[in-house]
Image (cartoon, grey):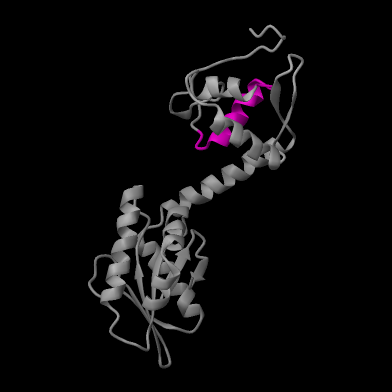
Amino acid sequence: MCKTGFSIIFTKANHSQLPGKGKIVSTLAEQIIKLLEHNPGLTDREITDSLRGHSDSQQPINQRCHALKDKGVLVRRTRPDGLIGNYLTSQAGNYMAARKVETNQKSTNDNLSEDNVKRFLEKWLAGDGWQVQVAWGYSQGVDIEARQGTRRWVIEVKGCGSLSAMRVNYFLGVLGETLQRMDDPEASYSIAFPDIQQFRRLWERLPALAKNRAGISALFVDKNGSVVHLEM
């Protein structure tokens, strides 16, 4: 019990499991919000002690609390004991609801297989007037070859993969496959993935010079079949 009248519940947060819900949450911001729901007014140090342990630095918590303050999710004000406490605002519920939608969307996109991505791309290309040939499953050859008049578009596709390291290998592998298929100077070449954050970041990290010289663009497909085409 805090001498200033603040009743604080400290629980050991193994594997990011928070008090009262028995649920696993994925981000530090969500952990902070769930903790403050039960313990309004905690300081950064008290939040750190609860979520990370007494020996951990409070800097990550401090940074995240300031970020949540900037989003209007919490306010920071002086407690009766002179320490700065963190208090949720009415926006906290909206923030958590938006995070839930985002997590559900990400989870669904994470389940897109290679053939799912091909199927959506086939429909998207056909809707734009392309004649599309798809190599389904483990068939050999170009994953998707599309033609529209004299235009030719070669697309190599990967599914989601279950692990981060696997996705890196997928990304590097599909780049290599595409480069090996570059035998037509008039054709367009693209790589395609489920629209998840890791694949987006891998594409962003690929230097613009490499993209320009190779002439490769990227296609990102979500669970609803929406396609985003990025050339840079």
The relative height of residue 58 versus residue 203 in the rendered view (above or below) is above
60 left or right, relative to 71:
left
Residue at point 70% right, 23% down?
A: 84
The residue segment tinted magenta is 25-42
95 left or right, relative to 175:
right
Using the rendered image of the protein, determine whether residue 224 is visible from the camera's viewpoint.
yes
The percent coordinates of residue 152 (x first, y second) are 38, 86
Q: Residue furthest bottom?
A: 150
Residue at point 52% right, 37% down?
A: 27
Tell me which secondary structure the magenta stretch mostly adopts.
Answer: helix
Q: Say which quadrant the N terminus sits in.
A: top right
Residue at point 55% right, 15% down?
A: 10
Q: Nearer the viewer, residue 142 or 3?
A: 3
| Residue 37 is inside the magenta segment | yes
The relative height of residue 5 versus residue 229 in the rendered view (above or below) is above
Using the rendered image of the protein, determine whether residue 162 is visible from the camera's viewpoint.
no
Q: Quadrant of residue 120?
A: bottom left
The percent coordinates of residue 14 (x first, y second) are 44, 24
Q: Quadrant of residue 194?
A: bottom left
